[in-house]
Image: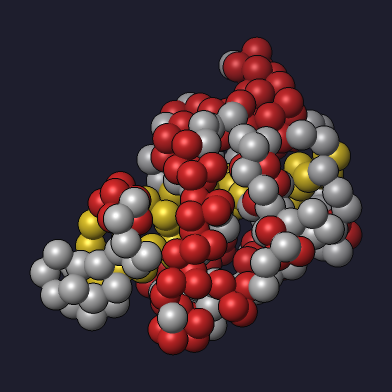
Amino acid sequence: MSIAHEIRHARRAVALTGAGISAESGLGTFRGKDGLWSRYDPASVASIESFTQDPRKFWEFAREIGWSFLTAKPNAAHMALAELEDMKRIDCVITQNIDGLHQRAGSKRVIEVHGSIGQVACTKCTATYETAKAVDQLVRQDVPTCERCGGSLKPQVVLFGEMIPKKTLDQAFKKLKSADLFLAVGTSLEVYPAASFPEAAKKSGAKIVSINMERTRWDDLCDYRVSGPAGEILPRIVQAIKISF
């Protein structure tokens, strides 16, 4: 048996992606020895408490790292997952990433567990805007504000101390429990609730595939494990599936 064979014959395959897949597009990961949190204190710059007290700290942080996220391009791994969806080989992508690269690659069914940098919302009246509006304002002021009420704008991402929207989490678990193949790509799964996803899928009878650069604490759950760059491995799997048709 091979991963290509398992995907080819799965009734419903679900992919989960983490920071590792976006790292191949040049985006820094948040955790680990060289991650962004080794240089910044997340409680000071990326928590809902600090944002509420002083949104300028967050937007200073966003100025430093934001441009790389807004200009990043999908890599071969993103493209391969979009192609697998188009081939009806995977049902959806659940992602921990906030960069929107799956959608830019062409994936249509994406569940963004931690939200997306694609839009910002007013913290007072909940009006929403494209992130480009906030970027334009940051040239002239410290904190982008709402055109309607003047409230501070916040990216529609889940900050530290915020709950993941129940609807999003319910949707993710519904997909996991209906899957017979779970494909984890570029994620060490150190953060809950995503850290519980492999076990939830396994309990529902799914086979577990891991494509990751490093070993993880949940490797014992895996039926297949491949170590290496997703941008090299996933396109080869797609090609193998095509040959098998």
Q: Quadrant of residue 157?
A: bottom left
Q: Quadrant of residue 61?
A: bottom right
Confirm whether residue 170 shows in the render: no
Q: Quadrant of residue 243?
A: top right
Q: Is residue 102 left or right of residue 227?
A: left
Label tally = 0
Where is residue 158 drawn, in percent x and y?
Answer: 48, 70
Residue shown at 82%/43% (left/top)? 213
Colouring mode (rainbow / by chain / secondary structure / one colour)? secondary structure
Q: Is residue 147 above or below residue 86?
A: below
Residue shown at 43%/72% (left/top)? 56
Residue shown at 35%/56% (left/top)? 138
Q: Is residue 156 left or right of residue 34?
A: left
The quadrant of the rendering that contains the C terminus is top right
The quadrant of the rendering that contains the N terminus is top right
Which residue is at the front of the view, 202 or 166?
Answer: 166
Where is residue 172 drawn, in percent x and y?
Answer: 49, 63
Q: Is residue 213 above or below residue 50?
A: above
